[in-house]
Amino acid sequence: MDTERQSTGEWGELEAERYLRKAGLRTLDRRWRHGHGELDLIMREGKVLVFVEVRVRTGHGHPLGTYQSIGKGKWRVLRRTALAYLRQAPWRPDAVRFDMVGIRRSGAGGLIDITHWRNVGVFGRNFRY
């Protein structure tokens, strides 16, 4: 990964974390890796474990573009990585969900807006952990 893209990702993750903490979530881990997958943020909202994927886009496009930037393959990797985390999690949550945070910023690096999609359904209807 090139350093510009990496620094953009780190910036986005910090912005997303700050936003979610203001909304009442507590950070448990950042950039948790397993195999070929990485979870950007792992947070807790009450007794709910929340995995968060963060996407940053530059420009003034529609916020949905950040959500649509994740393909089926990436969702599979995220799901596998989240399940690996659950197998070794230090506590047993009452529920688990996957959120996504889309961040749009200007070409100069200024924040345009943040969109938070809750419970994006990565695990599927029959998910049990």
Image (cartoon, rainbow, N blue to C red):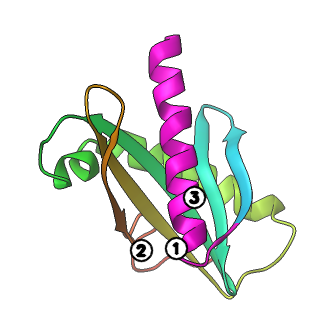
* Label 3 or label 1, whichever comes before in sequence order: 3
Q: Residue furthest right?
A: 90
Indicate the amino acid at tag 3.
Arg
Indicate the amino acid at tag 2.
Asn
Q: Is residue 109 left or right of residue 85?
A: left
Specify start and end residues of the magenta stretch as a single range.
1-26
Give the residue drawn at x 45%, y 65%: 99
Is 44 or 109 nearer to us in this picture? 109
In the image, residue 99 sits, relative to residue 84, either above or below, namely below
- Mark identifier at residue 119: 2
Write down the quadrant of residue 44 in the picture.
Answer: bottom right
- Mark identifier at residue 18: 3
- Is residue 62 magenta-colored? no
Count of labels in the image: 3
Q: Which residue corresponds to mark 1?
A: 97
Give the residue drawn at x 22%, y 48%: 68
Question: Residue 121: image x %, image y %?
Answer: 38, 70
* Label 1 or label 2, whichever comes before in sequence order: 1
Give the residue drawn at x 40%, y 71%: 124
